Amino acid sequence: MSILRFEDLVAQGRVAGKRVFIRADMNVPQDDGGQITEDTRIRASVPAIELALKAGAAVMVTSHLGRPVECEFKAADSLAPVGQRLSALLGREVKLISNWVDGVSVAPGEVVLLENCRLNKGEKANSEELARKLAALCDIYVNDAFGTAHRAEGTTHGIAQYAPVACAGPLLSAEIDAINKALAEPKRPLVAIVAGSKVSTKLTILKSLSHNVDGLIVGGGIANTFLLAAGFNIGKSLAEPSLVGEAKAVIESMKARGAAVPIPEDVVVAKSFAADAVSTIKDSANVADDDLILDIGPKTAAKLAAQLMAAGTIVWNGPVGVFEFDAFSHGTETIARAIAASSAFSIAGGGDTLAAIAKYGIEADVGYISTGGGAFLEILEGKTLPAFDILSKRAAG
């Protein structure tokens, strides 16, 4: 994918004195009092802002936060807490500006934060009227919000159509590079881990990957549906019996290419879904009618770990068991530590995946950790993201 990169514009001396509009993703979690509880996304947005400031640009930054109703401002929708945290990270005051669509006053070397962009009329609908107004605010538009790259909205797509220059920021560029390395030009064998509660939510991902990967590891409720497809009893475990046919189709698609979907040979079960439930390791063939499968067993985990250690590229989306409960966390921990120890290039994404990475402290050992949830999943589905598409078209002239 050919795109214009903001870093290249800076290196070419094309940014000094220019009005730069950065669409960041600073949609951070907050507690009931409005205090930010986790600021990873704000910290990830800082490099693009600092790059623009050091180049002498007049910098405008905006983001969405939560799910506001257009044109109906509420205090809970405000980016004020984000602005305070951003000010601390940048070591300078970042003024918050409301009602900014018709004009912004900012001088070269300054940075302002533009209030929640999803409050603007026409943002979600990607209206042309709004897009043209946004484009008129700047000389250079920078998309640095991979988490929203799958949405065609005013600040992620429309503005890029009409801004004098449209490019990708360092965070978005890094996502594109990692995705290309993992999926477009992977070092083989390419092994994907797709786990979660339901096959239905990730069926298109499974189908798409089955045409490309050399190994497809399934976990969680998804694995239970595949166990059903392989003829095993899963007791009262979470599964989707109506999608057994789809699971069989994925297995056959892989088999036709000489690849495989490893079916768990042992599992960890309990009689109830609870943190203090008694765990029992059983062969997959011995699951009782009143058992709940809550993790893969140690034999399965060891075999999958060996497969990951031998991989050239690993794509990871989802824990393979109920890792929040210690008794049912061992499968996910084994997988996580194998990925960390593997020489393969690894890319991981999805909220639960990031939580597992944090729990086992392997952030530094994963090749690339994606900042986008929905956008990462759509990439795995084989979709072209609207933000990528428009930047590519603009780069092509």
Image (spheres, grey):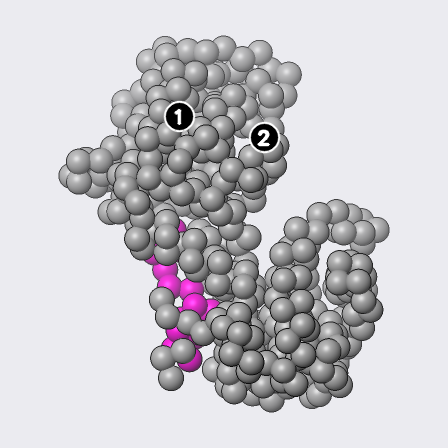
Query: Relative to 306, is 363 on the left or the right?
Result: right
Magenta residues (range): 379-394
Q: Position of residue 242 (x, y in %)?
A: 34, 37
Relative to 216, is 61 above or below?
below
Is disc 1 in contact with disc 2, using a CB cutoff of under 8 Å? no
Say if the magenta span includes residue 390. Answer: yes
Give the number of callouts.
2
The amino acid at mark 2 is: Tyr
For the stretch drawn in magenta, what is the main secondary structure? helix
Q: Position of residue 334 (x, y in %)?
A: 47, 24
The amino acid at mark 1 is: Ala
- Snapshot quadrant of residue 190: top left
Relative to 140, is 285 above or below?
above
Q: Which residue is mark 2?
A: 360
Kindly state the secondary structure of the residue where label 2 is placed: loop
Which of the two discs, 1 and 2, labels the residue nearer the N terminus? Answer: 1
Work out whether residue 9 can be spotted.
yes
Quadrant of the drawing holding the N terminus: bottom left
As drawn, the label of residue 305 is 1
